[in-house]
Amino acid sequence: MSTITAQMVKELRELTGAGMMDCKAALAETNGDMEAAVDWLRKKGIAKADKKAGRTAAEGLIGIDSGLREAVAVEVNSETDFVARNDAFQTLVRNVAKAALAHDGDHAKTSAAKYPGSDKSVAETIKDAVGTIGENISFRRSAKLKVGEGVVATYVHNAVGDNLGKMGVLVAIETAGKAEAAHAFARQVAMHVAAANPMALTVEEIDPKAVERERAIFAEQARASGKPENIIEKMVEGRLRKFYEEVVLLKQAFVLNPDVTVEKALKDAEKDFGAPAKITGFVRFALGEGIEKETSDFAAEVAAAVKK
């Protein structure tokens, strides 16, 4: 049997919000398998769905740059928030975003590309910045959206400057309609994405493994009610529909008007565009999502619980 460490209990608690002793029991029951432990807690009704995107830990900034019918988001990390407020660091992030826009948002190509206004590459410039600023700095990721006809809108949340903040969102809409109206609506959708954190644009784009995982959990929860299998299947399908409404962008209740879905809001907005429209993609970068950060006081608390 695997040894259950304080760090494992801490991580599971951050993922699920469950109590320390429940997390310890879940890990013991699943031989230390983190994903299985999350499912174990959910089946017991102790935890909600795993939302790893909420594990924001690293410092730094999300940078946005945009052009005609295209936009890019980048994440550049630093060790402290103090450095993220530094003008030199902010200039670095803006220029990395500028380079990423010119290289299709491809991380490898951007890293190897010339840093704007310099003969050095982006990677070399970041390395130099580490020595100058005195902290470890890394260009973590980048993504770009582009449309042939239509708009790509951007939104920066918790902004610290123009196109810089703790979260960046891009939303692309294809339409032959009025660009100004389409851009205004796309920005509203970008604000929605920032708040609602969808998993995918459509049901078809959700990872089939994620759907099967939810189906298995819902089925076990339903069987606990003692209902016959034919009723259980209907219960599972109903819960899956609810799951889609929570994680699929087009099926989510629109934050600016919860009485309609994003899909319906888009259909209504077509009247202002003067033409049909389609959301073709979105990008949501939250600073440090998925990166853990040491919290020694809490770790000590967990360690005490593990020893009981």
Image: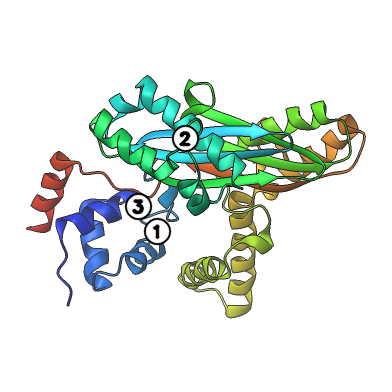
User: Helix, strand or loop at disc 3?
Assistant: helix
Query: From this viewpoint, is residue 285 visible?
Result: yes
Q: Say above or below: 198 vs 83.
A: below
Which of the two discs, 3 and 1, sits closer to the camera? 3
User: Helix, strand or loop at disc 1?
Assistant: loop
- Seen at 68% across and 48% down, the residue is 281
Q: Position of residue 217 (x, y in %)?
A: 47, 68
Q: Amino acid at mark 3?
A: Leu
Q: Are marks 3 and 1 in contact (CB under 8 Å)?
A: no
Badge 2: few (under 14), some or many (20 or more) residues near its Cα, within 10 Å?
many
Badge 1: few (under 14), some or many (20 or more) residues near its Cα, within 10 Å?
few
Q: Position of residue 97 (x, y in %)?
A: 52, 36
Sooner in the amino-acid sequence: mark 1 or mark 2? 1
Q: Say above or below: 34 vs 58.
A: below
Query: From this viewpoint, is residue 257 visible?
Result: no
Q: Amino acid at mark 2?
A: Ile
Quarter holding the C terminus is bottom left
Residue at label 2? 62
- Residue at the farthest front position: 119
Left or right of 174, for residue 292: left
Residue at label 3? 15
- Seen at 55% across and 51% down, the residue is 106
Residue at label 1? 45
Quarter holding the N terminus is bottom left
Rendered image quadrant of residue 79:
top left
- Residue at the farthest right position: 274
Q: Nearer the viewer, residue 291 or 24?
A: 291
Q: Are marks 1 and 2 in contact (CB under 8 Å)?
A: no
